[in-house]
Image: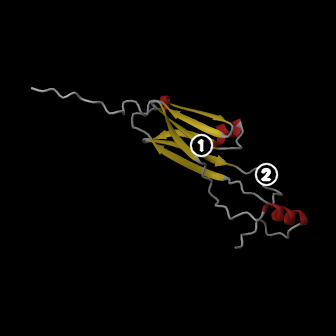
């Protein structure tokens, strides 16, 4: 099985060594889809997205968390600012968009976001409040 070459220029001895050592990379989709997990923490929903490699400055400019018509939307772009001279890359760059349905009553005040160790954590407070079934007592007449 052959893979698409990373560059069209002739391979240098270093390029050949890198490919021999690491192997040819599998073709990579141009789209960037960060891995996500959603967990329940009491009455809150916690969404975690893997977004490694963002500086604090880049994160505030390139990643956005929004509420839009009953959806928690996380979108942005991971920019490749070091592409010159690279002969092998399996890191994905580009725009991404992830959305998660939330109850209509959720407002922006219920949403907080933080970033640590390459993980964006978004907490939506109270999503599960009042969702537990309530047992109704049946009275005999």
Total numbered labels = 2
Image position of 48 (left or right of 84): left
Name the residue rendered at 65%, 53% in the picture.
94
Dot 1, crowdedness within 10 Å: few (<14), some or many (≥20)? some
Report the residue marked by disc 1. Answer: 49
Asked which quadrant contains residue 126, the reply is: top left
Name the residue rendered at 15%, 26% in the picture.
139
Name the residue rendered at 49%, 28% in the picture.
109
Residue 27 rendering spot, x and y as whole percentages: 68, 65
Above/below status of 1 relative to 49: below
Q: Residue furthest left?
A: 141
Assign the N terminus to one quadrant of the image.
Answer: bottom right
Asked which quadrant contains residue 65, the reply is: top right
Residue 108 rendering spot, x and y as whole percentages: 49, 32
Name the residue rendered at 12%, 27% in the picture.
140
Report the residue marked by disc 2. Answer: 82
Assign the C terminus to one quadrant of the image.
Answer: top left
* Nearest to viewer (mark 2 / mark 1): 1
* Mark found first going from the N terminus, 2 or 1: 1
SS under mark 1: strand
Asked which quadrant contains residue 131, the reply is: top left
Above/below status of 129 relative to 72: above
Q: Residue furthest bottom?
A: 1
Image position of 76 (left or right of 39): right
Above/below status of 83 relative to 121: below
Image position of 26 (left or right of 134): right
Instruction: Tell me the CA gap for discs 2 and 1.
Output: 23 Å
Q: Nearer the viewer, residue 77 or 50?
A: 50
SS under mark 2: loop
């Amino acid at each position: 099985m052959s893979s698409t070459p990373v560059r069209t220029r002739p391979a240098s001895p270093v390029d050949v060594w890198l490919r021999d050592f690491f192997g040819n990379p599998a073709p990579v989709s141009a789209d960037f889809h960060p891995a996500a997990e959603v967990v329940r923490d009491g009455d809150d929903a916690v969404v975690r997205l893997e977004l490694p490699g963002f500086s604090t400055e880049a994160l505030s400019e390139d990643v956005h968390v929004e509420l839009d018509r009953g959806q928690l939307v996380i979108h942005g772009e991971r920019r490749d600012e070091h592409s010159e001279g690279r002969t092998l890359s399996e890191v994905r760059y580009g725009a991404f968009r992830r959305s998660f349905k939330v109850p209509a009553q959720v407002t922006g005040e219920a949403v907080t976001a933080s970033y640590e160790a390459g993980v964006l954590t978004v907490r939506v407070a109270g999503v599960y409040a009042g969702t537990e079934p309530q047992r109704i007592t049946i009275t005999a007449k």
